[in-house]
C-alpha cells in the first residue's frame, strides 16, 4: 500500500470514529428545565409526552408528540422546544435534511439556541459540508451558555476535523491541540484515542512522519486500557501501516496480526476450533469403523473354519454348527437391515439439508457475483456514493451467508451430540446488551429502535454459548423481517420461582398461523417450506428450538400478518 493510499484510509476511519465519540447526550441542564416546563404546563399533554420521550431518547414517539403540540398549541416557547425535539430526533435517525429544516425554524431567542447550533454543526459534519460546520461550531463558541452544557473540547476537536478535511492544516493543528489540552484532563479514553489518531493523521497527510508517528504510538498504547475492540483494531492497523512504510515488515506483520485478532471475536475462534475438533473426531470414527469391519470379517472366517473342523467330528456337531451359523446370519442380516435403514434416514436428511443450504448459498453467491460486477463498473465511473452502497450490500450478503454456515455447523454438532453444554448462572440483561452491541450496525442501517427491557435482577441457569446462539438467531430474524424505522424489544415475564419468559417482540411483517405451525412442527429433519422466501429455510429456528430444549426450556410464537411477531422462550431461573 502506498503512503498516499494509506493517508486516505486513515482520513475516512479517523474522522468518522472521532465524530461518533464526540456527539454529546442531552445535558442535565436541559433536562432540568424540561421537567420544570412540564410541571408548569400540565395542561399541555402533547408537550409533556414529547419531553418525556425526548429524555428517554425514544425518537419516534418524540417526533410524533412534538408535531401534535406544534399543530394544536399556540405557545411560542413550547413550539421552540418541540422544534428542537424534532430536530434532535431526526438527527439521531439519520434524517439530516428533515433535522435541518426543523432546527432552522427555531427562533434565536430560544434559551438553548447554542445547542441548536451545535446540532446543526454535527449534522453538517456528517453531510461533509465542512464550511457550514465551522460556522455553526464557531457560533457555539460565541454563546453565553455555560460550558457545562456541552464539552468545549468536542467543539474544538470537530473544528479541527473540518479544517483537516479542507486541508487548512495550521487551523486544524491549532484546534486539535486546544482540544488535547482539555481532553487530557477529562475521563474519556475513547475520545482521547480518536484525537491522538486525528493529530497523527494531520501530520501524516503533510508527510511529517516524525511528528505523526508518536501520536500513532500514543493512541496504540492508550487503546490497551480500553475494552473497545474497534479502537484496538484501528490503532494496531495504523501501527502496521506505519511500520510497513518504514520498511520494518516483520514488525508490521505483528501489528497486522494483532489487528486481525481484535477483528475476530472469541466466538469465531471457538467455532474454528470446534470445526477442527469435529473433523478430527470424524476421522477417528471412520478409522474405528474400518477396524470393526475387519474384526467382523475375521469372526466370520473363524466361524467358517470352526464349522469345517467340527464337521469332521460328527453329524451332530455339523447340525449344531449349521444352526449356529444360520443364527449368526440372521442376526447379521438384522444388524445390516437396521444399519441400512439408519443410513437411508441419514442420507435423506443429508439430501434435504444440501437442497436447502445449496439453494441459499447459490442465491448468496449469485447476488455477490452480480454486486461485484456492479462494483467493478462503479469503480471505473468513480461513483463513490453508489460504490459505498455496493460495499454495504456485499457486506450484508457476506454476513447472511456466514450466519447460514454458522447455523449449519452448530446444527451438525448438535445432531451428532458433539456440542458441549455447560449450564451455569448467567445474567440475562448483560447477555442481551452484548448481543445488541454486535448487531448495532444492522439496527442502525434500517433505523430500527432497540430496547432492552429485561429485568436486571434475573439470572438464568442455562448454557451461555447456546443462549447467545439462540438470541443472535432470533434478533437476526427480527431485524431481517422488520420494516425501516421499526422497533424491536426484549422483555421478561416471571412465571413462577422456577421459570421466566423472555419475549423478543418486533413490529415487522409478521406471519400467518400456518407458517407458525410449520415452524413449530416437532421434527429432527429440515424441510423446505413452500413460502421459504418469506420465512427462510428454518435452519436457524430449528437450531434455536433444539438448543432451548437442551436447556430445559420451551418455545412458542405469537404473530399476525403486518402486526409484528413475538418469539417467546420459557427458561429455568438460577436458584
Image (cartoon, rainbow, N blue to C red):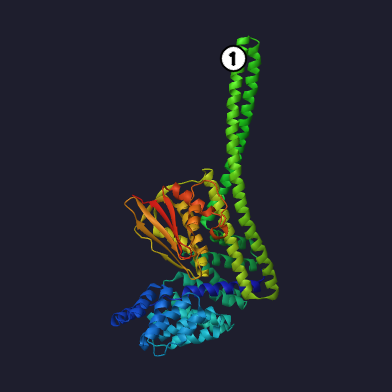
Q: Secondary structure at mark 1?
A: helix
Position of the N terminus, as image quadrant, is bottom right
Q: Residue at x 60, y 38 (%)?
A: 343
Where is residue 108 shown, x and y percent of the image? 42, 90
The residue located at (42%, 56%) in the rendering is 568
Choose between 67 and 154: the one closer to the eye: 67
> Is 503 situated above or below 211?
above
* Residue 496 at x, y percent in the picture: 32, 52
Inspect this view and state whether residue 242 appears: no
Q: How many marks?
A: 1
- 244 or 360: which is nearer to us? 360
Task: Say left or right for 268 vs 57.
Answer: right
Q: Nearer the viewer, residue 340 or 462?
A: 340
- Horizontal side of 521 relative to 76 (left or right) equals right
The residue carrying mark 1 is: 320
Whether residue 35 is situated above or below residue 466 in the rendered picture: below
Amino acid at each position: 500500500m502506498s503512503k498516499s493510499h494509506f493517508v486516505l484510509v486513515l482520513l475516512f476511519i479517523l474522522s468518522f470514529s472521532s465524530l461518533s465519540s464526540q456527539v454529546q447526550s442531552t445535558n442535565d441542564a436541559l433536562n432540568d428545565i424540561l421537567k420544570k416546563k412540564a410541571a408548569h404546563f400540565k395542561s399541555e399533554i402533547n408537550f409533556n409526552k414529547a419531553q418525556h420521550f425526548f429524555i428517554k431518547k425514544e425518537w419516534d414517539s418524540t417526533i410524533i408528540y412534538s408535531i401534535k403540540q406544534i399543530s394544536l398549541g399556540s405557545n411560542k416557547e413550547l413550539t421552540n422546544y418541540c422544534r428542537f425535539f424534532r430536530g434532535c430526533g431526526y438527527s439521531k435517525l439519520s434524517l439530516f435534511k428533515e433535522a435541518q429544516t426543523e432546527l432552522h425554524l427555531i427562533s434565536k431567542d430560544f434559551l438553548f439556541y447554542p445547542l441548536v447550533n451545535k446540532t446543526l454543526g454535527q449534522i453538517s459534519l456528517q453531510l461533509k459540508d465542512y464550511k457550514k460546520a465551522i460556522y455553526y461550531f464557531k457560533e457555539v463558541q460565541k454563546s453565553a451558555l455555560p460550558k457545562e452544557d456541552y464539552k468545549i473540547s468536542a467543539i474544538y476537536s470537530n473544528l479541527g476535523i473540518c479544517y483537516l478535511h479542507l486541508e487548512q492544516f495550521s487551523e486544524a493543528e491549532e484546534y486539535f491541540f486546544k482540544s488535547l489540552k482539555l481532553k487530557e484532563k477529562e475521563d474519556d479514553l475513547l475520545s482521547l484515542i480518536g484525537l491522538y489518531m486525528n493529530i497523527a493523521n494531520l501530520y501524516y497527510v503533510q508527510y511529517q512522519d516524525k511528528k505523526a508517528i508518536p501520536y500513532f504510538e500514543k493512541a496504540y498504547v492508550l487503546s490497551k486500557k480500553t475494552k473497545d475492540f474497534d479502537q484496538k483494531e484501528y490503532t494496531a492497523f495504523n501501527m502496521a501501516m506505519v511500520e510497513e512504510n518504514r520498511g520494518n515488515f516483520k514488525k508490521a506483520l505483528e501489528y497486522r496480526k494483532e489487528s486481525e485478532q481484535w477483528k475476530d471475536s472469541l466466538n469465531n475462534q471457538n467455532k474454528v476450533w470446534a470445526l477442527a475438533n469435529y473433523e478430527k473426531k470424524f476421522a477417528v470414527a471412520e478409522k474405528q469403523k474400518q477396524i470393526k469391519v475387519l474384526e467382523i470379517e475375521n469372526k466370520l472366517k473363524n466361524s467358517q473354519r470352526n464349522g469345517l473342523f467340527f464337521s469332521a467330528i460328527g453329524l451332530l456337531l455339523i447340525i449344531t454348527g449349521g444352526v449356529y451359523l444360520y443364527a449368526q446370519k440372521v442376526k447379521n442380516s438384522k444388524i445390516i437391515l437396521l444399519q441400512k435403514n439408519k443410513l437411508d434416514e441419514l442420507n435423506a436428511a443429508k439430501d434435504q439439508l444440501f437442497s436447502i443450504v445449496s439453494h441459499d448459498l447459490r442465491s448468496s453467491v449469485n447476488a455477490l457475483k452480480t454486486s461485484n460486477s456492479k462494483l467493478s463498473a462503479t469503480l471505473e465511473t468513480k461513483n463513490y456514493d453508489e460504490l459505498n452502497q455496493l460495499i454495504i450490500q456485499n457486506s450484508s450478503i457476506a454476513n447472511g451467508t456466514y450466519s447460514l454456515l454458522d447455523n449449519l455447523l452448530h446444527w451438525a454438532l448438535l445432531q451428532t451430540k458433539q456440542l458441549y453444554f455447560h449450564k451455569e448462572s448467567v445474567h440475562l440483561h448483560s447477555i442481551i446488551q452484548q448481543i445488541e452491541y454486535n448487531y448495532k450496525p444492522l439496527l442502525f442501517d434500517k433505523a430500527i429502535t432497540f430496547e432492552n427491557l429485561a429485568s436486571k435482577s434475573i439470572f438464568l441457569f442455562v448454557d451461555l454459548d447456546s443462549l447467545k446462539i439462540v438470541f443472535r438467531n432470533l434478533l437476526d430474524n427480527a431485524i431481517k423481517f422488520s420494516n425501516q424505522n421499526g422497533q424491536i424489544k426484549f422483555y421478561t415475564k416471571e412465571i413462577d420461582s422456577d421459570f421466566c419468559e423472555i419475549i423478543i417482540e418486533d413490529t415487522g411483517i409478521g406471519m400467518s398461523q400456518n407458517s407458525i405451525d410449520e415452524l413449530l412442527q416437532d421434527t429432527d429433519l429440515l424441510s423446505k417450506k413452500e413460502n421459504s422466501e418469506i420465512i427462510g429455510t428454518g435452519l436457524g429456528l430449528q437450531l434455536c428450538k433444539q438448543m432451548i430444549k437442551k436447556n430445559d426450556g420451551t418455545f412458542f410464537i405469537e404473530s399476525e400478518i403486518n402486526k409484528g411477531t413475538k418469539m417467546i422462550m420459557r427458561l429455568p431461573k438460577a436458584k
